[in-house]
Image (cartoon, rainbow, N blue to C red):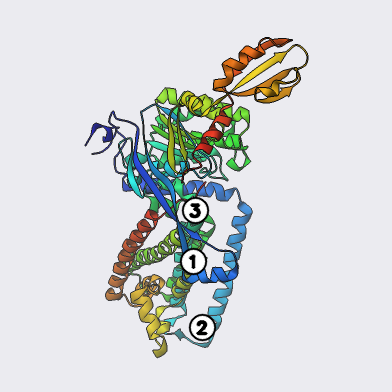
Amino acid sequence: MTGGGKDIGGRRGLGSYFRLLGAFGRFSLNRELAFRGNFLMKVLLEVVWLGILLLFFHTIFRNTSRIEGWNEYQYLFFLGCYYALEGLIETLFLENCVEFGELVRTGNLDFFLLKPIDEQFLVSFRHIDWSTAPKVVIGGALMGVGLWELGEPVTAGRIAGFVVALLSGMALAYSFLLILASTAIWMVRNQSLMELWWLFSSLMRYPRDIYEEPWAVMIQKVFTFLLPALLVVSVPAEAMVRVLDSAILAWTVFAGLMMLGVSRWVFRRAIRSYRSASS
Amino acid sequence: MSQGSQKGGAGPAIEVSHLCRTYKVAQKKAGLLASLRGLWKGETRTVEAVRDVSFRIDPGEMVAFLGPNGAGKTTTLKMLAGLVYPTSGTARVLGYLPWEREDSFRRQFSLVMGQKNQLWWDLPAADSFELHREIYSLERARFDSTLGELVELFGVDKLTRQPVRELSLGERMKMELIASLLHEPKVLLLDEPTIGLDVVAQGTIQRCLREYNLRKRATIILTSHYMRDVEALCSRVLMIVHGALQYDGQLSGLLDRFGRSKLVRLHFEETVPHGLERFGECKVNGPVAELKLEKSQIAQVLSSVVDLPGLVDLSVQDPPLEDVVAMAFGSGAGKP
C-alpha cells in the first residue's frame, strides 16, 4: 500500500539522482567560489607536489629504462591514472566520508536520515569538493602525454577495458571508504580507522608488479584478493598501456560490485544502530 | 488492518502505544587506572529513556510536550521521526511505522531542532531552499508559491540572499522553519524551536506556527521550556517525567491538578498594613501585597481581608504556569 497523494510514494528515478548530484555540484561550487583564496592555494600546492613527483621519476628513469616492466611513458600514464582517480575520489566522496564521523558525533546525521531520499547517496555525495577537481584534469593530461609519447594505436577494446576497470576501481575505493566511515556509528571517534584509508591509497599509488619479490608476494595476494587495493589504479592503467588481461579485469569488476554490496550492507547495519546524539 | 493504522487514512495523525526505549550507557570511573581497566571490561548501565508511553493525537491538533531536561521528550520525538528504534512498543505517524523511514512518509513530516542547524552555513538560505526542492522533487510552480507565502509570513524577504552564517539567531531559526515547511508537511515535530530567542522573535514564530496550523490543518508537537510558547499555541499538554507520561490533557487541567495554590493580590491606598504574614507566604511591593494561598483557604482569608483599612483593589489569580509546571515536574521526581 502506498500513500494517497499523487507525488507521494513514487520511487525516485535514476535521473533525479543525477539531477541532485548536479545540484550538489552547483551549490558546492558556489560555496567554493566564496573562498577563492583557499581554492587557488590548494591548486598551487597540487601542482608543486606533482612537479616534485615528476622530477623524481624522471631521475629514476634516467638511470634505468624500466621498473618491473613499466617504461617511462607507461609509468607516466600510470601516474596520470592515479592522479585522475584520486582526484575523482577526493572530489566526489572522500571529504564526505571523512566527515561522517563528525555528523554522528554531533547528531547532525539526523537531518540526512529525515530526507525522502537514499541516505547513503545523500551522505556520500552531499559536498562536491571542487578544489581537488583540477587533479582530474592534471591526471588526464599526464595520461594524454604518456599515450602520445608511447605512440601505439589505442584500440576500442583497450578504451573499454580502461573505462570499466576505472569505474570498478572507483567502486572499490568508495566501498572501502564507506565501510570505514560507517564504523563511526559504533566507535564515534574513528580517526585511527581513517588512517587505514591512507594505507589503502598508498597501496594504489604504485603498480602491483612491484610486489613480485618472494617476500612481497603475500602482500600482493592479500591486497589483490582479500582487500583489492592493488587493483584500483594498476588494472585500468595496464588495460590501456600494457596487457589487457581479461581474467584480472573480470576479477576487478566482480570485486568492485561485491564490495559495493558489502559496503551498503555495512552502512545500513550501522544506520540501524545509530542512537542520535542528544540535543 | 484497523482504520487507525491506515496510511493517509482518516485515523489519528499520531498513535503511540506502550513505547519504550532503553539505552546502555558506558560508566567511567574517575582516574587513569579505572580507565585502563575499562579497556578490558567496560561497565555499562541501562537507562530507561522512555517507559511505556501511550497517546494519540488527531490531525490538526497542536500539542505541547513538557518535561524537565532528560525526561525523554527528545527521544520520543526522535522515535516518531524514525531516527531511533524503540526497544519495545510501537508508534504510527500518518499510518506509517516511522523507523521504516519510507520515502512517502518522510515527504509528509518535518523535524525541527532549535539547537541544530540544517541549512548550508556558508550559502544564502535561498540556495538551501533550492536544494530542498531538489531533494523533495517539488514542482517548480508549487515550490515558488509556497516559498513566497512562507517568506511573507515570516517577514524575511530581504534576508534569503544573505549567507546563513551572517544572520542573527532569530533570523536563522525563521529560515530553518521555512526550510522545514517548504514541502508542506502534515506533521511537524518541533524540539525547542524558540530556544535562545528574544520575546519578539518568539512571538513571530508562534504567530507563524499558528497560521501554518490553521492553513494546512497540520498536526504539531512542540517541546519548549518557554511557557509563553505553550500558552500561545497549545491547548493540550503531554507531560513526561523520568520517561513516563505523567499527564495528558488540557492545559487548564494542568493548572487544576498541579496548581494547588492561588495568588491573592491586595492593592492598598498607601502602605500595606502589618500582619498579613499570618495568612500565608506574603510578598510586599510598595502598596501591593501578594499572598500565596492554598485553594481551600481562599474563602476564609478573603472574608478577613476585605475589611482591612485602605484596601482599594483585590484580585485572585492562578500562579504563573512556570511555577505549576515546576511543581508538576517535582511530583514525578519521587518515582523511579
Q: Do the residues under discs 1 and 2 have CB atoms within 8 angstroms?
A: no
Of mark 1 and mark 2, the one earlier in the sequence is 2
Q: Give the label on residue B258, or none.
A: none
- Residue B192, visible in the rendered structure: no
Q: Position of residue B309 (x, y in %)?
A: 73, 10
Of mark 2 and mark 3, the one earlier in the sequence is 2
Q: Give how far apart the Cα atoms at labels 1 and 2 are.
A: 34 Å
Q: Which chain does tag 2 point to? A: A
Q: Position of residue B60 (x, y in %)?
A: 39, 26
Residue at mark 3: A103
Closest to the observer, A97 or B15: B15
Q: Position of residue A216 (x, y in %)?
A: 41, 86
Residue at mark 2: A61
- Figure check: B37 above or below B110: below
Residue B31 horizontal side relative to residue A271, left or right: right
Q: Give the label on residue A194, or none.
A: 1
Of mark 3 and mark 1, the one earlier in the sequence is 3
